[in-house]
Amino acid sequence: MKNIYFDYAATTPIDENVFKEMSPYLQEKFGNPSSLHFFGQEAVFALDKAREKVATFLGANEREVIFTSSATEANNIALLGLLQGKENPHVITSSIEHKSVLEPLNASKAEITHLPAYKTGIIKVEDILREIKEETTLVSIMYANSEIGTLQPIKEIGEAVKKINEKRKNKIFFHTDAVQAVNYLPCRVDDLGVDMLTISGHKIYGPKGVGALYIREGTKISSIFHGALQERGIRPGTENIAAIVGLGRAIEELKKNNKKRTKELRDKIINTVLSEIPQTKLNGSRENRLANNVNITFKGVEGESVLMALDQEGVAVSTGSACASHSLSPSYALLAIGLSHKDAHGSLRITLGRLTTEKEVDYLLEKLPPIIKKLRKISGK
Ligand code: PLP
């Protein structure tokens, strides 16, 4: 077997219906939505339709959705746009957020509190409540972690923040990066109690280079970009119509995700690896994790060596997030949940998707044990 993909958390292939719907907007329907003639109006129509689809999925108003060039850009706009102009703001986030949340916060002048994620990889609502103070302006907690797949109690946080807001003058805004959650979890913004929510096209069988940000009516986001008035001036720049059309269609195709089946295959991998390969450990909560995420430490081996050996067998896995793969340091999310540097280096992320078959899972489970055995022998462990 060749070309087996177990890295769906890094990116996904474009769904065929998404591709079909996008295609005309790359050639014959090429208009700029800011143009007044019919080419432009055709693009406006497509843009409005896609916005309606995203808004419907989120249970939001179309005016509350803006399109961006990525989830990274959406996170930057949400966080920096909200903080801009605020005096001595305080932000509560977690130590396992994606870099596109952590880095803009580091670059801001805000005081940042990074909450622990414990061994389970799950933050505690009471930790948020304890850290809230007068200056707290923003809470940003991801819905599902990209590396260890753990699910955060977003609804509970939303309820807790709402209760606190009822008793104070200066509102605390609640943002969630839902990029990894969209495939498997409900994302209606009122149910979650969020003021801002980020999604990305390429994690949900849509195109790369497109994202969306939900901004609740009444949430003031200052422009961090300066330009024309596209996307209410919050994200100026000519809209990538084909990609936006793709994102809208990808949302409609989410029904193709078979959560139950994916979970069964995920559990087959977890159970087989833990029972058949000695000295292995699942990272993050077993119960509260994404249907498609497996993250396992293999004591005494380098994750990179396992990745390369599996690559030779035609199987693609990951040692962590794709954007950190050029760095030699181990995953900060794994360190944050208490792994030693050594164990973090010996960890593998296996993420499943819509196209994963049982045959592929069996092939992985056939190839993995002898690879670990061989690598441990070489390293004398
Ligand atoms: N947030 C999370 C949780 C992610 O997993 C990713 C991608 O890995 C991003 C944000 C960034 O998404 P994009 O590639 O659209 O910038």
Image (tube, rainbow, N blue to C red):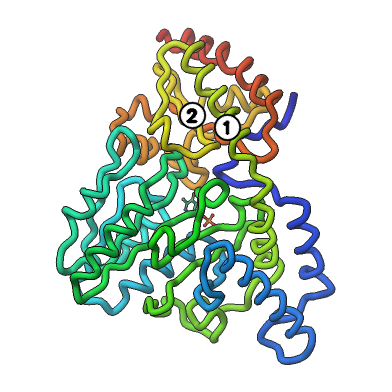
Image point (42%, 66%), residue name: 196
Give the number of the disc on residue 317.
1
Q: As shown in the figure, which amino acid type bears the numbered disc 2? A: Leu
Q: Does ligand 1 reach within 8 Å of label 1's beta carbon? A: no
* CB-based contact (under 8 Å), mark 2 and mark 1: yes
Image point (27%, 68%), residue name: 172
| In this picture, residue 30 sits left or right of residue 169 | right
Locate residue 350, reporting x and y percent.
Answer: 54, 32
Quarter of the image holding residue 329?
top left
302 over 152 or under it: above or below: above
Q: Nearer the viewer, residue 191 or 170?
A: 191
Asked which secondary structure carries label 1, the reply is loop
Cα–Cα span, label 2 and label 1: 7 Å
Locate residue 291, reporting x and y percent.
Answer: 53, 37
Image point (60%, 57%), residue name: 201
Q: Nearer the viewer, residue 116 or 343?
A: 116
| In this picture, residue 362 sits left or right of residue 118 | right
